Image: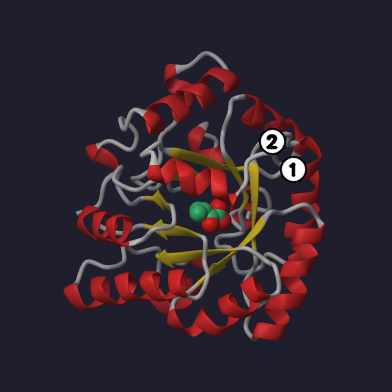
């Protein structure tokens, strides 16, 4: 049962304290991350790639996320638990209500949905029904077939403006957290400054209110392509616990992500 809640995270933004988030899929790692003081644990649909060996997140099911959320929730004492709603499990508001409720019952404190303006009614409806929401903008991997690959988003002015306006709209609809993925530094800065809610970045420079990493990337155990924004913390640490502590420290002091991980 988490001790940290969305108010704790909002206060961290107000006090300019960086929020550290990492993906977790099982009780053993969740317990290590929790003891290291990581504030947010994400049961991400990245599990489709790093656990199941798929090339993208599209095959992940609600039952997959539900199972791993239960595993993580059993181990967590302090961290805030965020769970992904997988591809097409929130394609209508009513689907979103039913499926989000299952993840909350499995132990999540909040659900994450990928997309912009089209989600405004759904997010409002979820929040009205007592389900906290994290929005996810920029590179939204469930739309990989629309983007035509894992590509940086918001490099053109029109696209950047649309992402910023979507962020403002979804905050207005009740989203209490935002993840932005693979966007240039300047856009990450505009979004972080414009929103009252905490903004967590991945591939979005170090100007956001916090960072999220896929745990396999943080330990250099991802197979195949390694995105530019990742870092293997085990290279500078002797064991997993020290690597997690280093990740948290470098997020807090702003040294991770460094220039070499940014997109411009
Ligand atoms: O699924 C996931 O792990 C995510 C992060 C990359 C933000 O959504």
User: What is the distance, in whole Å, between disc 1 and disc 2 at their CAs?
Assistant: 6 Å
Task: Check the picture and name the quadrant holding the N terminus.
Answer: top right
Image position, residue 63 (x, y; %): 79, 63
Q: For the point 52% across and 42% down, which residue is it? A: 21
Label 1: few (<14), some (14–19) or many (≥20) C-alpha neighbours in 10 Å: many
Q: For the point 68% across and 39% down, which residue is it? A: 3
* Residue 201 vs residue 124, the one in the foreground: 124
Q: Is residue 122 above or below residue 201?
A: below
* Residue 204 vs residue 222, the one in the foreground: 204
Residue with the mark numbered 2: 30
Q: Is mark 2 within 8 Å of ligand 1?
A: no
Quarter of the image for residue 169 reads: bottom left
Q: Is residue 169 above or below residue 102?
A: below
Quarter of the image for residue 60 reads: bottom right
Image position, residue 73 (x, y; %): 77, 44
Tag of residue 47:
none
Task: Check the picture and name the quadrant holding the C terminus.
Answer: bottom left
| SS at circle 1 | helix
Give whichever of discs 1 and 2 has the lower sequence position.
2
Image position, residue 92 (x, y; %): 64, 86
Q: Is residue 101 above or below residue 92?
A: above
Query: Looking at the image, do the residues carrying marks 1 and 2 touch, with CB atoms under 8 Å apart?
Result: yes
| SS at circle 2 | helix
Q: Is residue 95 visible?
A: yes
Q: Is mark 1 within 8 Å of ligand 1?
A: no
Residue with the mark numbered 1: 72
Q: For the point 48% across and 84% down, which residue is it? A: 118
Q: Is residue 199 left or right of residue 35?
A: left
């Amino acid at each position: 049962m988490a001790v940290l809640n969305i108010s704790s995270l909002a206060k961290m933004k107000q006090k300019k304290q960086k929020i550290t988030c990492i993906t977790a899929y099982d009780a053993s790692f969740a317990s290590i991350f929790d003891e290291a003081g990581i504030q947010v644990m994400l049961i991400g649909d990245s599990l489709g790639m790093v656990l199941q060996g798929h090339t993208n997140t599209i095959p992940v099911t609600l039952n997959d996320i539900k199972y791993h959320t239960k595993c993580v929730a059993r181990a967590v004492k302090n961290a805030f638990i965020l769970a992904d709603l997988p591809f097409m499990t929130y394609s209508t508001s009513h689907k979103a209500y039913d499926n989000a409720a299952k993840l909350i019952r499995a132990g999540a404190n909040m659900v994450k949905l990928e997309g912009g303006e089209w989600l405004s009614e759904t997010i409002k409806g979820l929040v009205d029904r007592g389900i906290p929401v994290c929005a996810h903008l920029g590179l939204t991997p469930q739309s990989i077939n629309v983007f035509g690959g894992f590509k940086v988003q918001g490099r053109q002015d029109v696209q950047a403006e649309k992402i910023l306006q979507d962020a403002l709209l979804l905050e207005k609809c009740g989203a209490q957290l935002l993840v932005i993925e693979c966007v240039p530094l300047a856009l990450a800065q505009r979004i972080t400054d414009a929103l009252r809610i905490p903004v967590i970045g991945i591939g979005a420079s170090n100007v956001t209110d916090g960072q999220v990493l896929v745990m396999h990337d943080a330990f250099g155990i991802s197979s195949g392509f390694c995105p530019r924004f990742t870092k293997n913390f085990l290279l500078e640490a002797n064991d997993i616990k020290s690597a997690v502590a280093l990740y948290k420290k470098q997020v807090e002091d702003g040294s991770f992500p460094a220039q070499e991980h940014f997109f411009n």
